[in-house]
Image (spheres, coloured by chain):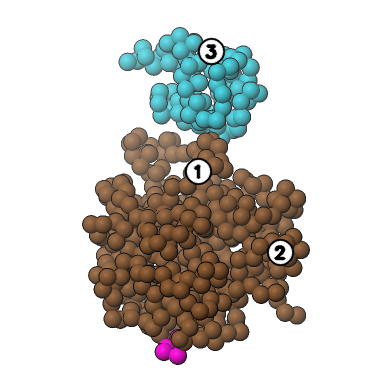
Chain colours: A brown, B cyan
Amino acid sequence: MKPARIVITGVGLTAPNGNSLTEFRQNLLHGIAGIERMEIRYMGTQLAGVCHYDPLKYQKKKELRVGTRAGSISIYCAREALADSGVNFETLPKDRVGIYIGCTEHGNVETENEIYNISKFNYDTKFWSHYHNPRTVANNPAGETSLNLGITGPAYTIGAACAAGNMGLIHAAQMLRLGEVDFALCGGISESIHTFGIFAGFKSQNALAQHEDPHKASRPFDKARNGIVISEGGCLYTLERLDDAQARGAKIYAEIAGYHVNSDASDYVLPNPTRQAECIRAAITRAGLNPRDIHIVNTHATATPLGDIQECEAIRAVFGEGCPDTYINNTKGYIGHCMGAAGALELAGNLPSFNDLTVHPSINVDDLDPACALPGLVLNQPRTVAKVDTILNNSFGMLGINSALIVKRFAA
Amino acid sequence: MTKDECKQVVLDIIADIAPDEDLSNVKPEVRLRDQLQLDSMDFLDIVMELRKRHSIEVPEADYQHLASLDSCAEYLTPKFIALAAKG
């Protein structure tokens, strides 16, 4: 039996440069980045991508006080996705809804806050918050979403470093195909800018971007790139089996065409282009396509000197010179690295290409690194193309987890 | 500290931990949980804030005394006075 066809029917997001798909897409087409200076505990001013959604749109003040930023971002994105999907949520059986949220890490923010808190009390642990455990359990973002929406189906997170956004979608598609749920909220989120540890860690790794102009700090593929801009963000989708979506007359953004996940098994932090290429090839094969059938490749490139080159090596190995209709872009120049949200957000930013046949560019490439000069790279200006029927989204993460997700234009 | 001042201390804490609640008509003799949306974690918050802000300790066996504003005042006012006397 052929596996059920899975479609995307709703998108909810918050990014450093937009709080809806429409706003996000407009800014991607107009080269508008969303990076700013932010005070980070112990470290002073750092560059970061900060989201400016209204947390009180879907939560009470008390929920915000008790819960986490990751939970709040998740709730905002989930509610926005549901509204966008047009589903009648009241009549949706809540025990048949799954919540699958990818995140790079969770709990660092709250743990750092509590240690800082007890430092004001001579490190006496009797001042440690009783909310620490519910705030830091790994399922917190999904759990808070289930509480907010009254969803009683499975709700959990998927830890997959910076591949997590794709993983949320892939896992949801799998669960829908298995019949575990009938409706899924899925994608990825990140609250990472609220932990100094991630900034300090990347700084110690010499991988934290610096630039006098915040909007120019994140510059994948540029010769002068000097590291990552850390960002928060979230993007959750509603996924359904095609039959269910059609039965309720849902609008369909795209169909899940193929995916693959593998591991480098070679280093804690250094990417492995051979495994990345294997991952991309396997996703294309699963989709029943050839490399020349892929029209947009959204790269993971984070603007580290080595990582960008290695991903380009992987892409060159798969696509070579024989894919004239394949265009390549990157979203991190606008929004920095949204960690667990990156894959989900970056896919969303490209979905409108099915309708407007425009590929959003990679920005901040003033001097293209020859090692990143891939054929079909769209730089600095959007490009209108003849055909966009497929989008391949790369997301890779530490400890060598690779994910490639392909969506295609829906055709009945 | 008077009992009314003590009630205000508790109300100030509740205002922070239950920011959506209207505290303008809290009846001092009625259990807080019967008139406000407070759960057991919120009462732990009250205990924690008394500890943090005022160095007042409320042992678990005494949590019952935090049921209403009146009972809070009865139980906490002597503690505040004793603390002030210690200087």
- The reply to whether residue A35 is visible in this rendering is yes
Tag 2 or tag 1, which sits nearer the N-term? Answer: 1
Q: Locate residue A270 relative to residue A409 in the image: left or right.
A: left
Along the line of sight, which residue is nearer the eye, B48 or A59? Answer: A59
Q: Locate residue A319 relative to residue B28 in the image: left or right.
A: left
Residue marked by disc 3? B74
Vertical position of residue A115 compared to residue A276: above or below: above
Vertical position of residue A62 compared to residue B51: above or below: below
**Residue B64 location in percent, x, y?**
59, 23
> Disc 1 versus disc 2: distance between alpha carbons?
29 Å
Vertical position of residue A227 compared to residue A41: above or below: below
How crowded pointer 2 is (Cα within 10 Å; few <14, some 14-19, many 20+) is rated as many
Name the residue located 66 percent from the left edge and 62 percent from the top edge: A251
Query: Which of the chains bears the disc numbered 1?
Result: A
> Disc 1 versus disc 3: distance between alpha carbons?
39 Å
Q: Which residues are magenta?
A: A318-322
